[in-house]
């Protein structure tokens, strides 16, 4: 793959992940499969790129949502604390597991998420 096509794909995928992340849907749900499938990156590398990009996207999204009054701070300490603890544990686990297992687990996660979303739409 040429360097220009690679750069174009990275910019396009960053744009798409940013849109989804800004909407609160999680850009990584889109970014990780795009990087692994179309750019042939390793699952662990794709997850690492997603985490770094997520920090920036989440910061901007948080600022916009807070200014619009969509962020409630009641009980946020417990969410942050448990998020930090389980993020550390998940990172340690991801570092131990082979990329193949991570790909399968992420695929199962996406399938379950899709099924849940379809059920929600059908119920309405």
Image: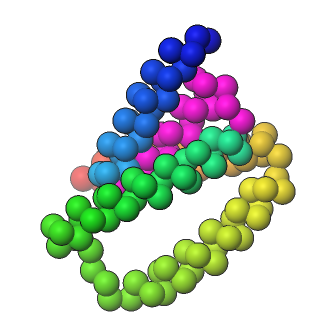
- The magenta stretch is 24-42
**Who's the residue at 37% across and 44% down the image?**
18
- Image height check: is 41 above or below 44? above
Count up the numbered dots: 0
Q: Which residue is pictured at 64% across the width and 73% down the height?
A: 86
Q: Residue at x 58, y 11 (%)?
A: 2
Could you say which is closer to the camera, residue 105 or residue 85? 85
Q: Is residue 117 left or right of residue 101?
A: left
What residue sits 79% from the left and 56% below the top? Answer: 95
Q: Is residue 108 left or right of residue 123?
A: right
Q: Is residue 120 visible?
A: no
Hey, which residue is sitting farthest left in the picture? 68
Residue 85: image location, x then y, percent: 64, 78
In this picture, is 15 found above or below 40?
below
Residue 3: % across, % down: 57, 16
The reply, left or right, for residue 81 in relation to residue 47 is left
Q: Quadrant of the N terminus?
A: top right
The picture quadrant where one finds residue 88 is bottom right
Q: Toward the viewer: 99 or 60? A: 60
């Amino acid at each position: 793959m040429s360097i220009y096509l690679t750069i174009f794909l990275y910019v396009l995928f960053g744009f798409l992940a940013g849109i989804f992340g800004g909407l609160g849907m999680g850009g990584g749900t889109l970014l990780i499969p795009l990087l692994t499938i179309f750019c042939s990156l390793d699952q662990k590398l794709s997850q690492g790129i997603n985490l770094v990009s997520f920090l920036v996207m989440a910061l901007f999204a948080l600022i916009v949502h807070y200014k619009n009054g969509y962020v409630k701070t009641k009980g946020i300490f417990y969410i942050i604390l448990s998020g930090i603890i389980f993020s550390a544990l998940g990172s340690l686990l991801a570092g131990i597991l082979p990329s193949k297992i991570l790909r399968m687990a992420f695929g199962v996660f996406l399938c379950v998420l899709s099924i849940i979303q379809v059920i929600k739409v059908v119920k309405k």
